[in-house]
Image (spheres, rainbow, N blue to C red):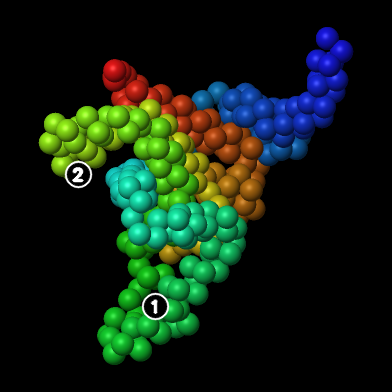
Amino acid sequence: MKKKKTCIWFILPGFIIYTLFSIYPILSAVPNSFVKWGGIGKKQWVGLGNYISLFTHPQLAPQFFNAAQNTLYYLVLNLVVVNTLSILLAYLLFKGIPGHKPYKVIIFSPHFLYPTAIGFLYTLFFDPTIGLYSRFMTLIGLESFRTFPWLSDPDMGIPLLLIVCTWKGIGYTMLLYLAGFTMVSKDYEDAARIDGANSLQLFFKIYLPMIRPTLSNVLVLTYIWCITLFDLPYVIAGREGGINRCMDVLETFFYRVTFSATSGFAGNYVGIGSAISVCVFFVVLIGASAFLLATGSRKYD
């Protein structure tokens, strides 16, 4: 009993700090979303007014729907492209391709880079005047392609963001899938080979179904990461989300409206921001639950 009390005293400071700066803001967002409040002064009850403004206000609604569309676009690309590449890379490394050990380090190492460093590298590579891409095109004689509008074409916003985020984060999901493949018993593969299964059949009939729990977890994590993505879009495209807000996602939209003096809601930035955060919370909750139900409902013997 004495040891338990000692442990509580060690845990208590961290728990208090976490409660004040994480749990309390999350819980307070719900009541604050029903009031008009700028953070200082008296709160004015507006009911669903903040939510109505979020979906109908001529200045706010277009930004919200644009950010939601960009986030959805990024989510779909991430689920289809990044997860597929992660599974394939993990399987190749699991099978021990030549150089698989250094490949693990090379693929995973960008995960440790800070977003500010990645934003600098992004500009260094894609900038139309000083970028490495333009220099490389000039060097190989393809000068007509050196001014490809990587940074000035709004349609390239989310694909470029996907490239950068994939380079940074694919190593982490790859390791999760690699751990899943490692946990599959070798007896299944040996039995399948005796029955005449080839490499493709082993992958689709043995390994892929056996890592279903890992796949379910990674899909849920990917969904949450995509919906709550903030750091890289903010570092790369700034507060406004780039040209025509082509990289504006839900979290950068929330930051701009809540903490920007030019958002037009200085007298109600806490109320509007709380409404946005509550909407994002329910999007994460409903979507993650749907992924869990869809990918974790079947049982494998």
Q: Is residue 223 visible?
A: no
The mark nearer the N terminus, 2 or 1, is 1
Q: CA distance from mark 2 to mark 1?
A: 38 Å
Label 2: how many residues lie within 10 Å, few (<14), some (14-19) or many (20+)? few
Identify residue for label 1. 133
Q: 231 above or below 124? A: above
Residue at the outermost left position: 196
Q: State which quadrant residue 189 falls in.
A: top left
Locate the N terminus and report the quarter of the image it occupies: top right
Classed neighbour count for the residue bearing mark 1: other residues with Cα under 10 Å, few (<14), some (14–19), many (≥20): many
Question: In x, y percent, where is residue 44?
Answer: 66, 28
Q: Nearer the viewer, residue 212 or 216?
A: 212
Q: Position of residue 27 (x, y in %)?
A: 64, 25
Residue 235 in the image: above or below residue 57: below
Residue positioned 72% across, 34% down in the render? 21
Which quadrant, please, contains the C terminus? top left
Q: Residue at x 16, y 42 (%)?
A: 198
Identity, as a three-letter code, of the amino acid under mark 1: Tyr
Q: Is residue 196 left or right of residue 241?
A: left
Q: Secondary structure at mark 1?
A: helix
- Amino acid carrying label 2: it is Ser
Q: Which residue is mark 2?
A: 199
**Of residues 134 and 186, the one drawn nearer to the viewer in this rendering:** 186
- The reply to whether discs 2 and 1 touch (Cβ–Cβ < 8 Å) is no
Q: Secondary structure at mark 2?
A: helix
Image coordinates of residue 78 in percent, x first then y, are 36, 47
- The residue shown at (33%, 47%) is 95
Quarter assignment of residue 200: top left
